[in-house]
Structure formats: structure tokens, C-alpha cells
Image: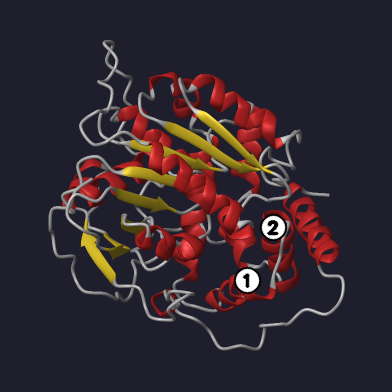
Amino acid sequence: MSTSRALKALLLAAGLASSSGCVRSYASAPPLAFQDLDYTSAEARTPWPLKRMALPKTAATYGLTRVPEMAFVELPAAPGARTVVLIHGLGSYLKFWQAQIDTLSRAGYHVVAVDLPGYGKSDKPGSFPYTMEAMADAVRELTQGLGVEHPILVGHSMGGQTALSYAIRYPSEPAAVVLVSPAGFEKFSPKEKAWFTRVMSTELIKSAPEYGVWGSVRQANFQNWRPELEWLIEERVRLAKSPEFDAYAYANVRSVTGLAHDDFVRDNLHRIRVPTVIIFGESDRLIPNPFMHGGFPRDIFEYGHAHIAGSKLVGLEGCGHTVQLDCPEPFNAALKAFLESVPASGTVAPPPSVAPEVAPKTPPSPPQVPGPVDTVPPATPDRQGPPATVLPHGS
């Protein structure tokens, strides 16, 4: 059996394991454009204010011929409020912070939730490298464009590895880092990296059947599935019918390659000099990677904890990988407790005396993606949201 067929078989098994009883099908539902994703407060049922910002510095750094725009939600706060930047994980978008955006805003924080390039309502340029360093530079340009000097970076999974890259390469800038089930701690062998490149393709993502989506979302990411989470399934199934889905699938493939080949982050954790907490689900089914070597989540996150000086480690019992949605109440309690402990602005430790190694900014060659879709997809066809008003905020 080929590796791609083996992976599909595993996804099928996960789908069958998670689908005892009847579940709703969205296969006949109409297509959903990325720009029509429902970015609405679950509590107030009002749309979050969506904005866009062009990223000319990031475009220049990575040789993009077209300046991409990044979509984000911003909830303002009183002058002097701390800024929390929420960074989503692989395959997701800012709505995955649905249980945190309003909660943090009510607590008095200036909240910025981003759609990374290639995801959600942000542009999806095929020429963007989709490395964690490029993602971090995009987040950094956006926060600087908003006048935020010392953001608190909160990253889930791939977003956690993005936050790690940011904090390692620009150690004096973040006020603190919150790593939520983060990627970046796990070691992958050369054979395992080659497997990722060989198996992951846009065709694999595009051809995933609905039962596979149920399995990969519900079974792999959650321990406490609830009916109100079915938007995760509906939106994924309907988005797959969108013309922009090719570009999104390509971004996912490139991102997986960027994640697996990013030893820079794992090897430089000791350079992080800001308050850091690692919050994870003790029943995470995705970290460590179940297709590769398996093991226990705590072992992986203990590695990061041991290599980031002064960090805190918080494991939540009975919670899965997407812990912020799976266990929102205990997660929010742990998050708010840490945020309240972060020192005031201006007390960030200085960078180490030895200049940190900066990951190369030259974009790598595109990976050899198997399958018929191996060309650069078109740019984002449409956009939503007004340009961002650049106003300084306390951080």
C-alpha cells in the first residue's frame, strides 16, 4: 500500500471511530467562500470588526511580486491596555479563538486575532514561503503597523511555532509568550521529514471525504465534542467547494513542510527571554505525531518547558489538541492567570549578550509536491474588510 493510501486509510479509520451514531452531513450544502466565513461573537452574536493590512516589508523580504494583505479582528481597549495577539494553527483561522476573543476583551485586553497568510480571509499567494519565520515576520509587521511595541503572543499548534520563531529572532519585542499545544518541540528524523514531503499534497487535502473530515477534526483534535462545534465540520466541507480552496490546500502543504523542517526553533528555545507558559491537553492525539513515532504529549511539552528558562507548564486533564475550544473554561482560567502575572511593559529582559542566530530570510525552494496540483495557484480573487486604521495602542 502506498504511503498516501495508508494515510487515507488511517483517516478513514479515525472517521469511523468517531462516528458512532448518526451525524449530520453537509455534502449537499452550498459552497462557502473564505470571505463569507462567519466571524461572529458566539456570545453577543454580532460580527467582530474585521480589518486588513498590507504587508510590504514581508513582501520585500521574501521577494513577492504582489504585496499580500492580512485579515485580522481587532477589539480595542482602554489606553495603556496590554495587547494579546492570537495566532491560529495549521488548517484553521482566527475563529478557532472563538471562546477567547470576547473573554479577553471583557478582561480589558486589546485583542488582535489574525488570519495567517494562506488561511481564513487573508490573501493566499502561492509564492509565499509558508515557513514559520515568514509567518512570524507577517505577524510582526502587522503588530508594528498597529503601533504595538510589546505584544503578548498566543499561538496554537503551528501558531505556537510561529510565536516561538518570533520570540527567538526578536527576543526583546514580545512581552510574553503563550504556547497552546505548540508545534516546534517535536524532533523529526530525515526519513520522517521526507515522508511528510512525499505524502502531503494538495490532492490529498482536496479529496478528503466528509467522513474523513469528521475523523480528522472531531477524533484527532477533541476529547469533549459538543453539537455547537459542528461549524468546524460544516465550514470545512463547504469551503472545499470554493474556487479558493486550491490556494488554501497549497498553503497547508507548504506549511506542513515548513513545520517539519524547522529545526531552527527547536534548537534555539534557550534564546527565549520573556515569560512563557505552555498550555496543553493531556489527551492530545496529534502531538506527538501519531503517524510517526507516537508517545505521550507531556513528554514533548516537557522538552520545551525544560529548554525555555523560567517557563510554566500547564496540562489540562481530559483535553485534546485544540484545547482552547475543547476545554474553554479551564483553558481560559489558565490563560488569564498567566496573563495577570506578566510584568508591566518596559520590564522585558534584554536580549542575550550573544546575538541570536537569525533564520535565513531567503525563501526556500518550493517542495516537490506529488500529485497533479503542483503549480502556483492564483492569488486571492476577492477581499473583505476595510483597511486598518493605524493607531498606537498600549502594549
Q: Is residue 324 left or right of residue 273?
A: right
The alpha-carbon separation of the residues under discs 2 and 1 comes to 10 Å
Q: Residue furthest top?
A: 353
Residue 114: x and y in percent read 36, 58
- In the image, residue 196 sits, relative to residue 328, either above or below, namely above
Q: Secondary structure at mark 1?
A: helix
Q: How is the image coloured?
A: secondary structure
Task: Give the residue displayed 38% in from the left and 81% down from the top.
Answer: 46
Q: Is residue 7 left or right of residue 180?
A: right
Mark 1 crowd level (few <14, some 14–19, many ≥20, 10 Å Cα): few
Task: Give the residue displayed 69% in from the left and 70% down from the top.
Answer: 226
> Mark 2: which amino acid?
Phe
- 2 and 1 marks in contact (CB < 8 Å): yes
Residue 326: x and y in percent read 64, 58
| Residue closest to the eye, 187 or 280 | 280
Q: Secondary structure at mark 2?
A: loop
Task: Give the residue displayed 49% in from the left and 70% down from the top.
Answer: 245
- In the image, residue 232 sits, relative to residue 132, either above or below, namely below
Label 2 or label 1, whichever comes before in sequence order: 2
- Residue 45 lies in quadrant: bottom left
Which numbered dot is residue 222? 2
Which numbered dot is residue 210? none
- In the image, residue 58 sits, relative to residue 345, either above or below, namely below
Q: Quadrant of the C terminus?
A: top left
Residue 353: x and y in percent read 26, 11
- Residue of label 1: 229
Count the marks: 2
| Residue closest to the eye, 344 or 87 | 344
Residue 156: in sight, yes or no? no
